[in-house]
Image (tube, rainbow, N blue to C red):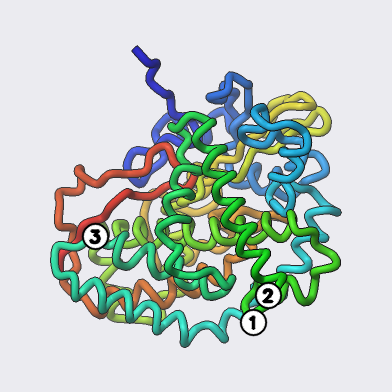
Amino acid sequence: MAKALELPLHMRRNGLDPVEELARARDNEGVVRVKTPFGVPAYVVCRHEDVRKVLADPARFSSALTPFPGSGQLNADELATMQAGQLIGFDPPEHTRLRRMLTPEFTVRRMRRLEPRITEIVQAALDDLERVGKPADLMEHFALPVPSLVICELLGVPHADRAGFHERSVRLLDTSLPMEQRVAAQLEDRAYMADLVARAQADPGEDMLGMLVREHGHDLSTDELIGVAGLLLLAGHETTSNMLGLGTLTLLRHPDQMAMIREDPALIESAVEELLRWVSVVQSLPPRTTTTDVEIAGHAVPAGSLVICSFPAANRDPAFVGDPETLDITRGASGHVAFGHGVHHCLGAPLARMEMRIAFPALLRRFPGLALADPEEQVDFRVFSLVYGVHTLRVTW
């Protein structure tokens, strides 16, 4: 009989909440030593202040020194190819070089230009949801298509390919799958992106991929272009789609908060920040490796150790916000780490925020009677996914 997989501590949830064990670790030790699924020891950092300190210090907590997932199955050349362009796997100055080329495309001002088109995409998805009829899967007809179409148009990816890259993304992020299958998904995804990059190099369009080819084609290698585009595509639809799904589930569990958003659209900005804090779909950024002996929350952590930051625990830290287990859409929760922190703070945060600020009010206005179609205990969470979410979310109205 195959051995049952054990979920790492920092990924354990009780529905939408971090498990009690994680909360106790935060409130007592602050740092807990665990063994990763690969048998390697690691230190899970649970407190908000300590998580921010780790993420703000790439000199002592390195991304580049952390082994690439599945790296043991690749030779040196294959590994270098797979890592090229992956911003989350580099430290400054290499990370700075790559990020500097992308930052102008994700400014708040640039994102505001997309607002009319995002509004059209949201309305079209709501039309589709209504056309399908109740009950309907909110993930399939709303939460997934909205951000995937936005990022497809932004990057210049044919929207007809959405089902394929979503299926590969789910496999890549599913830690319950054998590493061979996850590496295979990476290779398939890379082959797909290589074809897109080749087409952009032959005929650069007005999309972001075309811009990168025109303006930075001499600074970025083809492998880096492939890596950057693949990372943006993955992050651009997986994180926001699951925030739309789990954010809606959260509001359905808090009808008073949902009514406030519906009745006062001005609350949406603070509501989005509170939902980001409370839900924390990204469990953690990839582990850091200590470059020297360090101390975290009074615990000695030797050089060469893996350090994992728990975002759900940090965002529910009572030292960060008062009454952290209560959802309060009026507080805003500025300073949460749902988008990370420091040099690896999510590049696409302005885009994700805009999509949510448009999507949530539009959904609640269109369907004032929105409700779960199934008992809450039947919601099928993506327990083993690095980006937390639900497989389906059937709703009625």
For label 2, the residue is 210
| Labels 2, 3: front one | 2
Task: Give the camera-side residue of 201 and 243.
Answer: 201
Residue 272 on image: x %, y %: 44, 67
Q: Where, quadrant-wise, is the C terminus in this rendering? A: bottom left
Q: Is residue 280 left or right of residue 130?
A: right
Q: Which residue reaches farthest top?
A: 1
At numbered mark 2, what does the secondary structure look like: helix, strand or loop?
A: helix
Amino acid beneath label 2:
Gly
Disc number placed over residue 137 in the picture, else none? 3
Mark positioned earlier in the residue sequence (3 or 1) = 3
Question: Mark 2 to mark 3: distance in Å?
Answer: 34 Å
Looking at the rendered structure, which numbered label has been put on residue 178? none
CB contact under 8 Å: marks 3 and 1: no
- Residue located beneath label 1 in the image: 206
Q: In this rendering, would 178 be left or right of 374?
A: right
Q: Is residue 100 visible?
A: yes
Considering depth in this image, is 36 or 214 the residue closer to the camera? 214
Q: Earlier in the sequence, mark 2 or mark 3?
A: 3
Residue shown at 42%/67% (left/top)?
Answer: 160
Quadrant assignment, res 221: bottom right
Packing grade of label 3 (10 A; few <14, some 14-19, many >=20) is many
